[in-house]
Image (cartoon, helix red, strand yellow):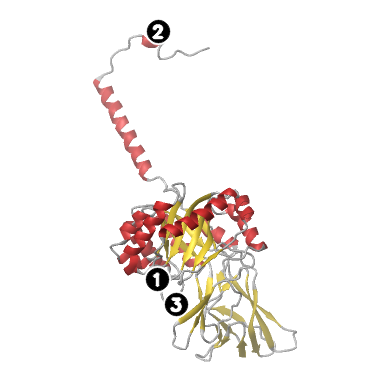
Amino acid sequence: MQRDSPWSPASRAPTPAPHRGTMRGMSMRRCALLLLLSVLAGCSRPTPLVHEAYVWQRTWNDPVLQAVRDAPLDYAGLRVLALERDAAGVETVVSPTLPALVGAALPVVLVARIDGARPPSDGDALATRLATLADAWTAAGVKVVGVELDHDCATAALAEYTATVAAVRAKLPGTLRLSLTALPTWLESPALAGLVAAADETVLQVHAVERPERGLFDAGRAESWIRRYGERAAKSFRTALPAYATRVTFGDSGTAVSAASESDNPNAGANARQLVADPKALASLLQALREKPVANLAGIAWFRLPTTQDRRAYRSATLHALIHGLALDGRPAVEFRGDGNSRALDLVLGNAGGTDILAPAAIRFDGDCITADGAGGYALDPAGGALRLRRPDPMLLAPGAKLAVGWVRCRRGVRPNAVFE
């Protein structure tokens, strides 16, 4: 049976006028309802941060192809190295496997890495070059949504860089978004506002932006920079976070002369330092950004997309946990290996959890042990009364990894107890 509509005769029958007290009660209930809705709106959860990844590999081998195929599991987009220009202006085109990007079906931003502290002066030509690459990738089926200029411009030259960026933006098709990487030192420049206005978006770098002596990444300083940048940036921006380690080599004068981030060499030499971003520090920063959102911060761009072959980058499981706010369950463990007849036991350090950890800075042996020696970057610490192996530099230890770190000799029948420091 059909119910009466608001226009039926029954619905138009006269009704008694409501009592004044009834009207007052209805008004109060309506106000209470509006107040409740207002409170609920104010307590609504902020929009989750969008996560993307940089694909920085120059050679697209099978591990890179597999990582790109798996990227949609955790990332909403990829920022792919497409062009490199050295300080002398010499360009090198990176040729990714485009069918892999097509298969991932993710939005892609082409990145041009421009070395040197002075901005390029040929904005029109650079824009034409990038637009040509974007057209070729699009014709192959890649979902190209923008281009990015990755340039560590000197703070004093930001006004000059702004002119270059404006020229690039004017020359690029309107369908392509123009992105810029930004540095924390730019926060002190009055030219920052004009530079931000000239582009469509920016990506604030908070890793590898200070002297190597200060490390690769500091969560406290990074959060401060991000919040200050959010106050200065009038447009949507992202921040680039590290998911890797690097080895910095120093010259005789103490100046950094090179950095290797993708080679597999966990042992730092006499003139080198290993710099690592601690996964726990990144988890702390992300939690702070979730609890107290930053104005205009739209997402995270991870550097870099990990592969199974990349021993200096986090494993995919670690980034998955960081992106989704899951617990990091990596934990160190030491195995003592011996034949039962010798008092010397070989030491094997491992990660018994499912996410990356920093290898312990020191391993102390409690028990009736006599001496020990280190390997794999560890050495016997002669200071203090305890028997201890120590490594001077941090190192990533992947899930399931095993590393021989030395040996320990104890009195017969004694099994040492390892304490991590």
- Element type at marker 1? loop
User: Which quadrant of the structure image shows residue 212?
Assistant: bottom left
Amino acid beneath label 2: Pro
Name the residue nearer the viewer: 367 or 332.
Answer: 332
Please tell me whether mark 2 or mark 3 is closer to you in this view.
3
Q: Residue at x 44, y 52 (%)?
A: 172
Q: Is residue 143 above or below residue 376?
A: above
272 up-or-down from 169: above or below: below
- Amino acid bearing label 3: Pro
| Residue that mark 3 sits on | 212
Residue holding disc 2: 9
Residue 239 percent across, percent down from the top left: 43, 60
The residue lying toward the viewer, choosing from 233 and 82, is 82
Farthest residue to the left: give it: 20
Select label 1 or label 2 by which is in front: 1
Any mark on residue 117, and which?
1
Q: Tag 2, which secondary structure?
A: helix
**Which three-letter amino acid code belongs to the residue tagged 1?**
Ala
Q: Position of residue 391 (x, y in %)?
A: 54, 82
Rounded to the nearest whole Å, what is the CA distance between mark 2 and mark 3? 83 Å
- Give how far apart the Cα atoms at labels 1 and 2 are: 80 Å
User: The residue tagged with tag 3: helix, strand or loop?
Assistant: helix
Q: CA distance from mark 3 to mark 1?
A: 18 Å
Mark yes or no: residue 203 visible: no
Task: Answer with mark 2 or mark 3, whichever residue precedes in sequence.
Answer: 2
Q: Residue at x 68, y 85 (%)?
A: 345
| Residue 15 occupies quadrant | top left
Closer to the N terminus: mark 3 or mark 1?
1
